[in-house]
């Protein structure tokens, strides 16, 4: 008699990294009818406390609907600056009870001290570079309030350079479609470095 050997297929391992789980959960909203609302909410909250960047929704949205890539960019930019302004106000008015504990909760003390140092050197340049550095924007936003830099400087430079960042991503998605996602993942560091250098030159020339 022949023996039947039944192979047991094990279920895929569950994702144990909470940040990756949150990222995947956020990414799912890009495929729903609430995608634009989700993009706005993520962009606002990421500027204050949420750990997942709005790129997670912006990129698949711009790839899926390239004709609306500019619209998605503007929604993302405006929401990000709104969230950043809220973060600024938290840092300005609620430094000890809320802002500092929030920074500690996310383990961003070292990044915060670096941002404080940059603000003492050149506030406008620091805000401009916040769009292109690995340090989360929330640290720059909350830090700007704590350091009491001009709110006008913060909002204006955030609006210009956050928009520049999201416009770069949206244009790549509009032009290259699905290929843009791989390109962005591979070369985002070089792209942001190039833009950061351009920003430094522009800001220094303006001064």
Image (cartoon, grey):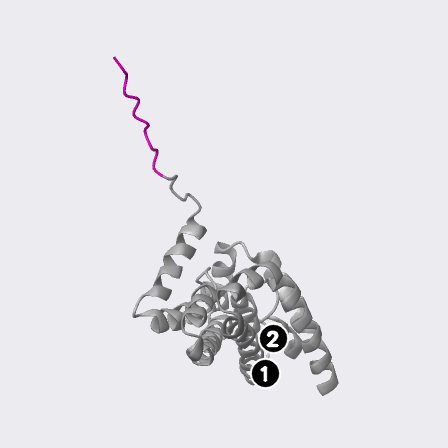
In the visual, does 33 lie left or right of 179?
left
* Quadrant position of residue 75: bottom left
Q: Which residues are magenta?
A: 1-11
Location of residue 116 in the rendering, given as x and y in whole percent from the top left corner: 63, 67
In the visual, does 28 lie left or right of 206?
left
Give the numbered dot on residue 168: none
The reply to whether callout 2 and callout 1 are in contact (CB within 8 Å) is yes
Instruction: Say which residue appears at 66% left-offset and 64% top-offset.
Output: 190
Q: Residues within 10 Å of mark 2 (few under 14, many from 20)?
A: many
Which is nearer the eye, 124 or 58? 58
Location of residue 26 in the rendering, given as x and y in whole percent from the top left corner: 38, 60
Give the residue pinned by disc 1: 153
> With respect to residue 18, does 81 lie above or below?
below
Give the numbered dot on residue 127: 2
Give SS at disc 1: helix
> With respect to residue 11, does 91 lie above or below?
below
The mark that comes first in sequence, 2 or 1, is 2
Whether residue 61 is in magenta: the answer is no
Whether residue 9 is in magenta: the answer is yes
Give SS at disc 2: helix
> How far apart are labels 2 and 1 at the CA level?
8 Å
């Amino acid at each position: 008699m022949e023996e039947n050997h039944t192979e047991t297929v094990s279920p895929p391992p569950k994702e144990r990294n909470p940040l990756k789980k949150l990222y995947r959960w956020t990414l799912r909203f890009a495929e729903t009818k609430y995608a634009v609302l989700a993009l706005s909410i993520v962009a606002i909250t990421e500027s204050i406390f949420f750990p997942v960047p709005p790129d997670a929704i912006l990129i698949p949205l711009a790839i899926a609907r390239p004709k609306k890539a500019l619209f998605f960019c503007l929604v993302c930019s405006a929401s990000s600056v709104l969230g950043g302004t809220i973060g600024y106000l938290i840092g300005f008015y609620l430094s000890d009870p809320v802002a500092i504990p929030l920074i500690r909760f996310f383990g961003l003390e070292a990044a915060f001290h670096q941002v404080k140092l940059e603000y003492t050197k050149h506030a406008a340049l620091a805000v401009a570079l916040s769009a292109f550095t690995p340090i989360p924007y929330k640290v720059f936003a909350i830090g700007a309030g704590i350091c009491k830099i001009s709110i006008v400087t913060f909002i204006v430079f955030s609006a210009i350079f956050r928009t520049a960042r999201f416009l770069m991503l949206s244009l790549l998605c509009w032009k290259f479609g699905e290929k843009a996602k791989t390109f962005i993942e591979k070369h985002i560091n070089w792209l942001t470095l190039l833009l950061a250098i351009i920003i430094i030159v522009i800001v220094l020339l303006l001064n």
